[in-house]
Amino acid sequence: MRALLIVNPHATSTTQRRRDLLAHALAGELSLKVARTESRGHAAHLAAAAADSGVDVVVVHGGDGTVNEVANGLMYRGVRPDAPMLAVVPGGSTNVFARAMGIDPDPTVATEQILEALAAHRVRTVSLGRAGDRYFTFNAGLGLDAETVRAVEKRRAKGSTISNAMHVRDALMQFFRAKRRNPRMSLELPGRDLIDDAHLVFVSNVDPWTYLGKTPIRTNPGTSPTGGLGIFALTSMGVPQSLRASAAIITGRLSGGRHVIRADDEAWATVRCREPVAFQVDGDYLGERSEVEFTSVPRALRLVV
């Protein structure tokens, strides 16, 4: 079986020794080539080339951003039956998609999982989300989450170490800024009246869509990686309403107050903004957008798990 291992050498929780051990273990069972990413977007190009060259499985060792790039590279011609299988060895600080799919956070154990799954022909066909022209594995959003990602990326660019505490601190700062604004977004969903007063919109492809340390954050507990999209929106940023909504997503309750909008297993959703709003996909800040169409892409990739 031909395999390509795509490694992000700058991922948060990877080391040269760990990467060497990972490659050695995979090479013992697979015809393996190793490629290291050199810049943002490089993983997507490597995965696209692998898809066109007859590689059987692409193994990615990196964080959520690298996994997203590889998924986009594998999908650059759309859904195709001859696309390589995807396997993920966590290497980032959060590893949302891997954790949501039941992949062990320890890279050594995850590698054993991959080899066992390949030997047993255990492959799961999963859906992806698409936001405009960008595919996502676990979540995309406009508003508070994207503003938080933007703030964290600015800190990282200045040399700060990424942590959960940093995310929480920046999320609180962005929340108090957002609560002073009027609603900026309208949300259109299949078969529903237009929601014209949204402050933020999350669109999920898996559940949970992120973690606070070991605590799963579950905006849409009914979302599965083989179904449609989960939509979560808030129409108020008042403190009492936001506290109720936060308690609901941390505990996984479906309640949260009348200002919480939830929809599960949706084929699409369209968000239009009165002014450009911060936009993120799988934890990567992609600038500001005035309109984004989200669509579910069923049976998009074969995941080794």
Image: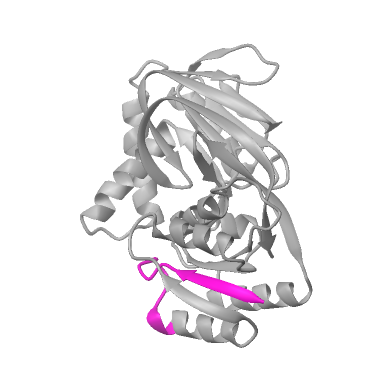
- Residue reaching furthest left? 158
Q: Is residue 108 above or below residue 253?
A: below
Quarter occupied by residue 217: top right
Q: How many marks?
A: 0
Identify the residue at image location x=69%, y=51%: 126
Residue 22 coordinates in the image, percent (x, y): 52, 81
Identify the residue at image location x=41%, y=54%: 164
Toward the viewer: 302 or 264?
302
Q: Which quarter of the image is occupied by the N terminus?
A: bottom right
Quarter occupied by residue 294: top right
Q: Which quarter of the image is occupied by the C terminus?
A: bottom right
184 falls in the magenta region: no
Snapshot colouring: one colour
Residue 259 coordinates in the image, percent (x, y): 56, 20
The reply to whether residue 240 is in sight is: yes
Residue 144 coordinates in the image, percent (x, y): 41, 33
Toward the viewer: 59 or 196?
59
Identify the residue at image location x=50%, y=23%: 271
Query: Which region is colored magenta?
Result: 1-17
